[in-house]
Image (spheres, rainbow, N blue to C red):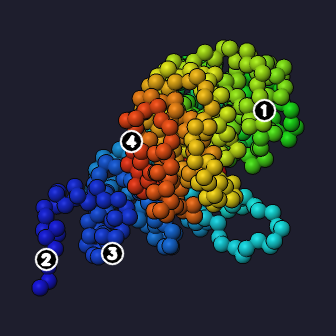
Amino acid sequence: MEQKDRRSCLPDDVLQSILRKLSLKQAVRTGALSRWWESQWIRALASSPVVDLTDDPDFARGQPPALSAATVDRCLRLHTELGAPLDMFRVALVCPSDLDGQDVIGWIATGLRRGARAVEVDLAPPPPEEEDEEEEGEEEEDPHAGHEAPLLELPADLFQARNSLERLALGSFSLHAVPLPAVGLAGLRSLSLSHVDVTDEALRGLVANCPALERLSLRRCSRLAMVSVASETLRVLELVGCQALKQLCVDAPALESFALHCNIFVTNPDAPCEWDWDTPVEVDLLGPPALRDVYLSHIGCDTRLDTEHNALYPSLCLDVVLARILTICSIGLLVRTENHNAHKLIRSVTIYSCGSDQHVDSLSWLDPFKDMPNLEELQLLMDYEGYCLEAVSGFFKLIPLPVLQRLFLHIDHEPEGEGSSSAAVWSVENDDSKDMAPKEEIVLDQLTFIKFVNFSGTWCQLRLLSFFLDKSPVLQQLVLVTPEGEGALGDDRLKVIHERVAALEKASSEASITVCRPKEDDTPNHPHTRYFHEEYETM
């Protein structure tokens, strides 16, 4: 007996309230069953104050560009016909080279004209086409090089009329023709630019043009070099993957959140630079502001970096000692120690390394760093070079963290052979955990939660984990999330890891241990996790 579609009999207002909650991907699947359902979803979306086509940024892939553009056009046209108020317009497209740029500009103009407070349009470059395998001995190229579509230039008159705009997010656009000041941007509270050709001068003009600006996000803006940001109202500043950056000066007394992912950076312009292939980024936080959360990393930013070039990792910690949430990368734990006199000049370096074959005789130059009295959440982004136990233990020995409650460790990758050599991990000679961790006089007496991501159970990882277990007398929960993809572990290996970790000496007898795969993990992530993924997926 044929079943009746009882959902189609629902009252229109009830049906539309349900359909508005469907994501684009769900709506497409529903529309495949019935054109009636497709038209109902379009109408429901068009009557909503929020037109959001970003939940599946790949929806244009696999269909003609005209079809995906027509979907957006249809939504906006119906929205205008229905006369519904428009509060937010968001769209993300994988941008083919033959997409009509005038259509996209028309969408933005429609959003502004309809009184939208938030307009977000991201035109992601098309993915690189598959090519034949490179010949043996041929150098690998940057996977993103040569595959970026031209930036879409915004017209000069787009922001010249008054509007209700408070949030603007643009991806893969050119602002070259937009004159400043622009009255249509004066009310912005949030500005996000990703892969935009904004220059140093234009950025200064934009910030000056937005007296109420509270959030500024700059990602992969390759023309930014000497950045100066001055704002009385700015609370959040993010610079991620702006590879040409050489100088950053921030005068923002209200700044609470700061994220910086770029090449090596220093806060002392007189600090010595011992290599000539690059110069460190000079960072100056005037004030400094009372920052609440801070993210500092240059892992993955420059493939030429190695342990010989880590002497001048940033510091900034004199400026961020009051932060409650902090992320630093393991390269930040690596400061060469063979030239003590040179390092005494770098008064703002907070993090040091006594690499495995080095020893620090005198650390008096680090006296200014007594503690970080407010730090509750710490995330260490670890590349393989940087997670030597001595570097990590040295950081905790030098900088007391009296209220640290949650610790997150995120391993980037394992060198070839390390993860695959189970003998190196599980050999009988390594079964004695007593010598795993150095017996430093450190107690993390507020630490209740540790999460270790990409944990595969190598000897280095076990030593690092053992160090924290030995120093955490009130630890309640330990979560070990194993790698995914090619490095995924089988059930037997997960069981062995659990048994091995359970056998480690612990200061807390109450700590629960969870070993799981990423999809099985439902425990909290560090607030900065999003930056980590963006670094490696978009650089």
Q: Residue at x 40, y 35 (%)?
A: 509
Q: Is residue 459 above or below residue 436?
A: below
Could you say where residue 45 lies in the image, as x and y percent from the top left?
Answer: 31, 57
Which quadrant is home to the N terminus?
A: bottom left
Q: Is residue 226 visible?
A: no
Q: Which mark is residue 32?
A: 3
The residue wearing badge 4 is: 512
Check contact, mark 4 vs mark 2: CB within 8 A.
Answer: no
Check contact, mark 3 vs mark 2: CB within 8 A.
Answer: no
Distance in Å between CA atoms under marks 2 and 1: 76 Å
Badge 4 amino acid: Ser
Going by the image, does 41 lie left or right of 12?
right
Badge 2 amino acid: Lys
Mark 3 vs 1, N-terminal side: 3
Q: Which mark is residue 4?
A: 2
**Mark 2 Cα shell of 10 Å, populated few (<14), some (14-19), many (≥20):** few
Q: Is residue 38 above or below residue 531?
A: below
Badge 1 amino acid: Gln
Q: Is residue 514 above or below residue 28?
A: above
- Of the pair 328 and 14, the residue shown nearer to us: 328
The residue wearing badge 1 is: 358
Could you say where residue 238 lies in the image, as x and y percent from the top left?
Answer: 57, 36
Give the SS element for disc 4.
Answer: strand
Furthest toward the bottom, the residue is 1
Mark 2 vs 1, N-terminal side: 2
Badge 3 amino acid: Ala
Check contact, mark 4 vs mark 3: CB within 8 A.
Answer: no
